[in-house]
Amino acid sequence: MMNKYVILLLLSVVIASASQILLKKSAMKKYDTILQEYLNPLVIIGYGLMFVSLVVTMLAYGGLEYKNGPVIESTSYLLIMFLSAIFFKEKITKKKVIGNAIILLGIFVFYL
């Protein structure tokens, strides 16, 4: 059975990934003023989600060994690759697959 703190940290990774997608979507738009660039709904929600992710991460680390945190958080690379393919129509290239496979291999080796 999965530890509730691991689930919390995975939730934090999902929230942070969603935040990054929103911020990239905002960065791809043109704005008339610098104020509009930083005070638009995508940016505000994106940074709000990043703050929520921070709080959830802190709660998760309350019940995890610190050595496990970076390993679990590295799953964000996989999630971002898939979310970018969905929302930005970015291609999942051979290099991306190999890079993510190496990350998964590292996670697997770490937990042996």
Image (cartoon, rainbow, N blue to C red):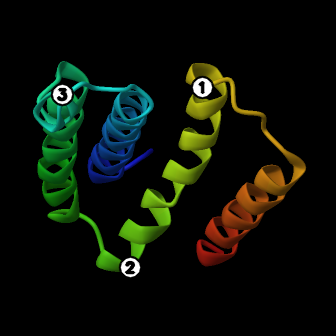
Q: Position of residue 69 (x, y in %)?
A: 36, 67
Counting every numbered tag in the picture gives: 3
Q: Seen from this angle, which residue lies furthest front?
A: 32
* 1 on left or right of 77: left
Calculate the distance from the C-alpha at mark 1 to the C-alpha at mark 3.
Answer: 18 Å
Instruction: Please state which of residues 96 and 62 is positioned toward the viewer in this rendering.
Output: 96
Calculate the distance from the C-alpha at mark 2 to the C-alpha at mark 1.
Answer: 33 Å
Q: Which mark is residue 88?
A: 1
Instruction: Please state which of residues 56 and 39 is positioned toward the viewer in this rendering.
Output: 39
Instruction: Please state which of residues 70 and 22 is positioned toward the viewer in this rendering.
Output: 22
> In the image, what residue occupies the spot 84% across and 56% down?
95
Placement of the C terminus among the 4 image quadrants? bottom right
Calculate the distance from the C-alpha at mark 2 to the C-alpha at mark 3.
Answer: 30 Å
Q: Secondary structure at mark 1?
A: loop
The amino acid at mark 2 is Lys
Residue located beneath label 3 in the image: 45
Q: Position of residue 3 (x, y in %)?
A: 34, 50
Q: Secondary structure at mark 2?
A: helix
Q: Quadrant of residue 7?
A: top left
Q: Earlier in the sequence, mark 2 or mark 3?
A: 3
Q: Earlier in the sequence, mark 1 or mark 3?
A: 3
Tell me if mark 3 has few (under 14), some (14-19) or many (20+) residues whose alpha carbon lies within 10 angstroms of its own. some
The amino acid at mark 3 is Ile
Residue located beneath label 2 in the image: 67
* 62 on left or right of 31: left
The amino acid at mark 1 is Phe
Tell me if mark 2 has few (under 14), some (14-19) or many (20+) residues whose alpha carbon lies within 10 angstroms of its own. few
